[in-house]
Image (spheres, grey):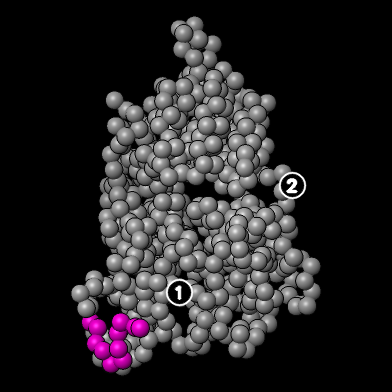
Amino acid sequence: MFTLLKQQKIGNYIVAFPIKQGDYAETYRVKDASGKNYFLKLIDLAKLNGKQFDEDDNVIEVDIMKGLNHPNVMHLVEQEEVTLGGRQMAYLVSDFISGETLEQKVSREGSNPYEVREWVCNVLAGLQYLHSQADPIIHNELTPQNIMFDATTKQAIIIDFGHARHKSNGRRAFDKKGLSPYYLAPEAMNGIYSPQSDLFAVGVMTYRLLYGSLPWLVKSGDDFEDRLQSEREKPPKVVSLSRVAAPDGMVETIAKALAVDPNNRFQSAEEMAKALRGEVKVVINNTSSQKKEHDSPHKASKSGNGLADVAGMRDLKAQLQRDVIDLLREPEKYKRYGISLPNGMLLYGPPGCGKTFFAKKLAEEVGFNFIMRTPSDLKSRYVNATQENIAAMFKEAEENAPTIIFIDEINELLPKRNSDAHEMSRSAVNEMLAQMDRTGERGIFVIGATNLPEEIDEAMLRTGRLEKRIYVGPPDEEARREMFEMYLKGRYTDFGIDYGKLAALTDGYVSSDIRFLVDEAARMALTRNEKITMALLEESIKAHPSSIKPKEPEKKRIGFK
């Protein structure tokens, strides 16, 4: 039974009729005083689980939708909280879309490959916008049921952000309950999501719209997810289907999007859209027997200038030089004083502050080989496979020593063993502890990066493991000035850009924020057919606050004294 009745007033709107009902929310068509139509989503706050709130107790869905403005993304008009029948509720009002979902449209009319290509390119344009935010937004529920076709504009529009998350929200904010496993990327099954997991879902959706079925199907029952994952180890059957004459490159595009390894998928929605339109040639590399591009270490010093490429941040670079670089460069000198090579280092701090960039530049600085891994590269649902992957990584590093191993989002790989972590996660921690025994003596230096140091198993933070711990915070004023100079270089700019003032106005902003500010100013200048001026840059800064809330390093929580 729906909460609101026809003609019932809620805020400034009158209910026209109910549309659908879910576990915690109901959707209605409503009208304002002028008779204009809108969609209204009514959320029962008591039915939300903890993962649907951020650390400040705000509803993540509401926080994500604020400020979104793109023709292929549902636009939030208003949001309020109300009490109805003694229940605390929130409602979201969004622009009305005169049309139907892609699922409904295809079921009613069918489709042709060229229509499907246009719809999917619309979706990818919306995704590129979401993924390009200062703190990227991952939708996590891209299915034909969550894409509306607007009969007025003839555009496909992404709707329903109930499972969407900022990339910085991390695994702890992800809840796959209610999501179709067929559209979930393999890594998303384990709670790890990224722009590439959205692109996997787009691949499944494209296949579904084109062929009327799903690329992999398994019977329901026990171990359903394991059996589905096992099926995905096989190449998708899309390459053998011929009953639909798809445009050139479309079949290959779907196959690449459906790669099990996220590193073998498209790396951006824009890249996938270009492939669909035939603007770039698709190279498929998604079989387990094929060697990943990043599997072989490389001499990072052959390209780049080491820490000289890092803008500003003199104090941080000096600390790295003193605590790590000099030891790695001159081990024999330090050995005379009884100081051995450290085994590893943890870079921690807010998202977007350049921890990955620092690790790569450190490898260049000392001339070590560099191996980069993510938890999704190493984790496996198969018994003992995760431990084997970790052992193989260290073996490869030792064979090519001296080597820096960099593991991003290391908290996902090494959660606290006394938490509710799965037994396989505990085994991964144990294997990592064993492999890190005397890594310095074997010519291996391990760097972990995380936004959530408090979630890492304590044993990994003890002496002999990730014993050097460095806080990487937002860039300082000097770095911000250099970033503005870098991002504005070569653009159609006016005279009189005050880089010092821009740096002063952006205290607490990270590199991705600054690039976003410059891009926004450039868009405004393009719209007005004028140069990028200081006034436009200041307007952009005023309209877009930092994507992070700067925090002091939580030293006690990760073993500092």
What's the magenta region? 1-11
Residue depicted at 35% across the width and 54% down the height: 547
- Most distant residue in the top direction: 336
- From the viewer's perspective, is residue 112 above or below residue 35? above
- Taking the spot 75% from the left edge, 46% from the top edge, the residue there is 289
**Rendered image: mark on residue 290:** 2
Asked whether residue 3 is drawn in magenta, I would say yes
Residue 204 position, x and y percent, is: 62, 67
> Residue 253: which numbered mark, if any?
none
Q: Quadrant of residue 393?
A: top right
Query: Compared with residue 467, is residue 310 higher up or lower down, i.e. above or below?
Result: below
Secondary structure that dominates the magenta span: loop
Q: Can residue 464 be seen in this view?
A: yes
Residue 398 occupies which quadrant of the picture?
top right
Viewer-nearest residue: 463 or 86: 86
Any magenta on residue 213? no
